[in-house]
Amino acid sequence: MNEGEVRFPIYLDHHATTPVDPRVVDAMVGAMRGLVGNPNSIEHSAGRLAARAIECARDEVALLVGCDAANIRFTASASDAIGKALALAISRAVVARPKVAATRVEHPSLLARLDELAGQGRIEIVWLDVDCRGQLAGTAVSHALSSGIDAFCLMMANNEVGTIYPVDAVLAACRAAGVSTIVDATQAAGRLDLHAVSAMCDFLIFSAHKIYGPKGIGALFTADPGPDVDRQFAYAGTPDVPAIVGMGKAARLAHDLRSAEQPAMERLRNRLQAGLQSAIDFLVINGDVDSRLSHSLHISIPGVPNEAMLSRVGHQVAISTGAACASGAQGASHVLRAMALPEALADCALRLSVGRFTTETEIDLAIGIIVREARAILQAREEKFAC
Ligand code: PLP
């Protein structure tokens, strides 16, 4: 889209999902039109062509991750990859009921799977606390390691407040202690370098729809793609070739564009932040401002309940109260609770994130809309309390 051209609602919810890049759409349409064969039917050329397209997509994802294509498997989503990584890590553990450490701010799909496994008596969970910025609390990692854990789950960056975690240091400590590691790179892919992480972890998780690819397709990196990985993927069904081709194209674009795109993203995010701050001087920025994703802005506007804000701006600006799966739910998200954000700030929390196609014009318009509605809500509340 050209600068100056605005499509409503202005889309500022890239943590929830990203719009599909037109180049990805073209690749997928090409696959739908041109690749008629089943990639498992390698007896004929139509099947072999489809299988070849999957191999090319695997190469593109491997390029982004910095690994060999043999380490990459496609999954139905990041959530699916999380389930498979946990199953593999548990089956590889030497004890019958492994201890698995995880922060309290992991994605709900990981938390739900851990709860389920713990409920079945198959694992013991060791929870790691975060501080008020959503950052790992000082001694959390050493405390977990000294309690004899077998596996460690950590996201590279948080999907709600955008906090980036010191994954390299955690992976080094886990490796020294012989602890297996599952890293959720769903929000980090295309934004942070993955090469050092893939060199150090056992499992790495991705989703295409966070990198301008299609929804319903993800990937799992396994450092050791042994026969247990083959068994885990044995009954996956016929691969979704266009979706895989789309993920491959999205990964290639993420790899090629990342170094230019991230500074541009940061400029846009900072413009949004500065514009809101200068109009609302009591605005609070949540998360770790020294270590957060460049496109991410999590704020609270005290006195402006987020439900009221969303009901007023929802048709003009796409922003959210928290994680897509938690929005609409009553009360603060598990992330804000783990950060012990005061209720007065949690009730007014808004998650905003810019993206590849966001323009300065859109940012300026969004600032104007959010500020106008915040003032209107504050004024209405003042009048109500004055009566
Ligand atoms: N992990 C993180 C950090 C996420 O942000 C998300 C999606 O919001 C997921 C996992 C799940 O991704 P998917 O929608 O592909 O299952």
Image (cartoon, rainbow, N blue to C red):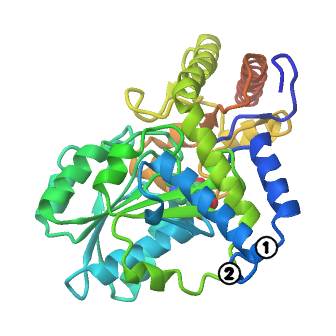
Tell me the amino acid under the disc marked 2: Asn
Secondary element at image label 1: helix
Going by the image, does 9 lie left or right of 300?
A: right
Q: Quadrant of residue 354?
A: top right
Q: Callout 2: 10 Å neighbours few (<14), some, many (20+)?
A: few
Residue 275 seen in render: yes
Sequence-wise first label, 1 or 2: 2
Residue 327 seen in the figure: no
Residue at 66% in and 65% down:
52
- The residue to which callout 1 is attached is 46
Work out whether residue 78 or residue 55 is closer to the camera in this orientation and state it. 55
What amino acid type should be assigned to the residue bearing mark 1? Answer: Ala
Q: Relative to 113, does residue 291 appear above or below in the rendering?
A: above
Q: Are marks 1 and 2 in contact (CB under 8 Å)?
A: no
- From the top left corner, tell me how far across and down residue 15 is, in percent: 61, 44
Between the residue at mark 1 and the residue at mark 2, the CA separation in whole angstroms equals 10 Å
* x then y, percent, for residue 48: 70, 72
Quarter assignment of residue 361: top right
Quarter of the image for residue 32 reads bottom right
Which residue does the numbered mark 2 point to in the structure image?
40
> Looking at the image, is 213 positioned above or below residue 58?
above
Q: Residue at x 42, y 27 (%)?
A: 289
Is residue 382 or residue 146 the one in the foreground?
Answer: 146
